[in-house]
Image (cartoon, rainbow, N blue to C red):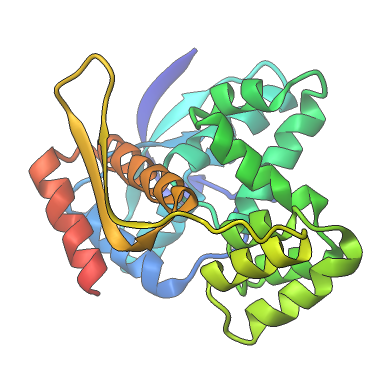
Amino acid sequence: MTKLEIKPLSWLKPDPDQPRKQFPEDDLRQLGESLRAGQLQPCLCLSDGTIVAGERRWRAANLVGLETLEVKIVEPKCDTEKRRMRIVENMQRADLSGFEQWMACVELLAGNPEWTFKELAQCLSLSPSSVTKIMASSKLTLAWREALRDGKVTLSDCYAASRLPDHEQGGLLALKLSGASRDDLEKATRKLRGSAAPVARLSRVRCPLAGSTTVVTVTGDDLSLADLIESMEAALACAKKANKEQLDIRTAEKVWRDKAKA
């Protein structure tokens, strides 16, 4: 059961158990200015004002001096359902860092130990390959996880490192922190795994969709299949976020173009 209400900001309160821990002020201020123009997505709250999902919107509204927000009052049946609602909403809005995404998935699996990665992916509306990449961080050493937490490495970096045994991950982390690119990490990983097989690369990849006249084209410098997968997953995440924010495709493209220039 849910219902929409307009509530003063003072009524809302953050949930200490939520996965997002970092709230950069510049991002919040930008979000706050967009909220002035209109709130497209309500915050999810319990009946006592505890924020299930939307703390970032609440902080942004406070920062720019708004007085109220639209909230959806939800009544989860248990703590597990509350955690699932919070994580799913944040993941679908692409509001979490790589480390927060990993922690959120770990939390969901802990509450649902019978789930496979495929079932977790279905719950989060993600592709199974995306969940596999996120959960690869569970195979890493503490040093790699701390680097992910601090924003020094990405989930893609972690996925490359996860294919190595613990005693070889330290050298790869040192290479990444010294400024190595993701391609450098891939090459180092293949070398450490004893694979000298060359990776085919293209500057332009055309992917006709089965049963459709649509063709997805990706261009870039020396694209590998791994690059194609990462690019298309990132594009899908951007498209889902734009859909959540109720943007049309022309506006969404302009927003992406402006962000790329910035």
Q: Tell me the quarter of the image containing the C terminus.
A: bottom left
Residue 18 visible at all:
no
Return the residue found at the far right: 167
Rendering coords of residue 61 (x, y %)? 36, 58
Say which residue appears at 56% left-offset and 36% top-offset: 129
Give left or right: position of 249 versus 136.
left
Say which residue appears at 11% left-offset and 48% top-offset: 251
Rendering coords of residue 27 (x, y %)? 38, 67
Q: Nearer the viewer, residue 104 or 76?
A: 104
- Which of the 4 quarters of the picture holds residue 207? top left
Rendering coords of residue 59 (x, y %)? 45, 59
262 vs 166: above or below: below
Give left or right: position of 229 versus 14.
left
Q: Nearer the viewer, residue 254 or 47?
A: 254
143 vs 17: above or below: below
Say which residue appears at 22% left-offset and 44% top-offset: 217
Rendering coords of residue 247 (x, y %)? 18, 40
Residue 197 visible at all:
yes
136 vs 62: above or below: above
